[in-house]
Image (cartoon, rainbow, N blue to C red):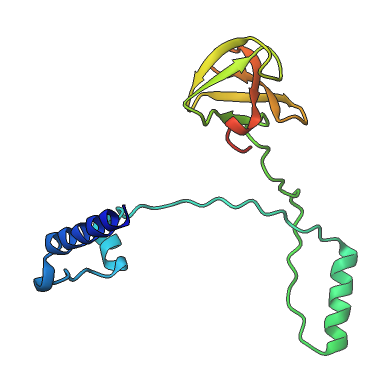
Amino acid sequence: MPKLIIVTSLMLFWAFYEMSGGADFQPLEREPAVARSKAIVPPLPEAEETVVTFVAEPQVTPQVVAEQEAAIERVGYEREPVLISTAAPVSAPEPADPRDIRLVTGDWVNMRDGPSTAFDVLNTLPKGTEAEIIASNSDGWAQIRLLDSGQTGWMAERLLTDG
């Protein structure tokens, strides 16, 4: 038996050696990875992009201005005009959807009547189905509501995308 394994291994080695070109093998020259990635991905068209940044303005009171002026005079610098803003502070916008929406990650996942495999199967969901997490327990089960039909049930939380 060991002779058969050795002979077979040698024959396979010889076959691969010959198929790769044998002694005449010349490796192809390749472009660097950076050059290949530029060739694969076409440049994006130039587009104007608007970036909106919400910044809360600091509260400036006459007391703060007076303290700053006093500090400037103590140091001996010339006083620069101080701009006092009376605008209300800007707050960040509220999130559009506070619900915990996740996607089914398995190909066909059973949605059950309760939080274990002992409960009946209510529906079998394909990969990518959107569901809202209603509740989850410490055993790794999540109560979900399907966004398309509103149907509720339980599913193993490991089969949903991270929230």
At a point 51% along the width and 19% down the height, the residue shown is 125
At a point 52% along the width and 15% down the height, the residue shown is 124
**Is residue 84 shown left or right of residue 48?**
right
Residue placed furthest toward the bottom:
76
What percent of the width, then of the height, locates residue 103? 54, 30
Locate residue 11: give its quadrant. Answer: bottom left
**Is residue 37 shown left or right of residue 49?**
left
Observer-nearest of 53 and 149:
149
Q: Can residue 25 be seen from the camera position used here?
A: no
At a point 56% along the width and 18% down the height, the residue shown is 110
What percent of the width, then of the height, locates residue 152? 65, 14
Residue placed furthest toward the left:
24
What percent of the width, then of the height, locates residue 80? 73, 78
**Is residue 82 shown left or right of residue 144?**
right
Relative to residue 107, is residue 114 depicted above or below?
Answer: above
Relative to residue 110, is residue 44 depicted above or below?
Answer: below
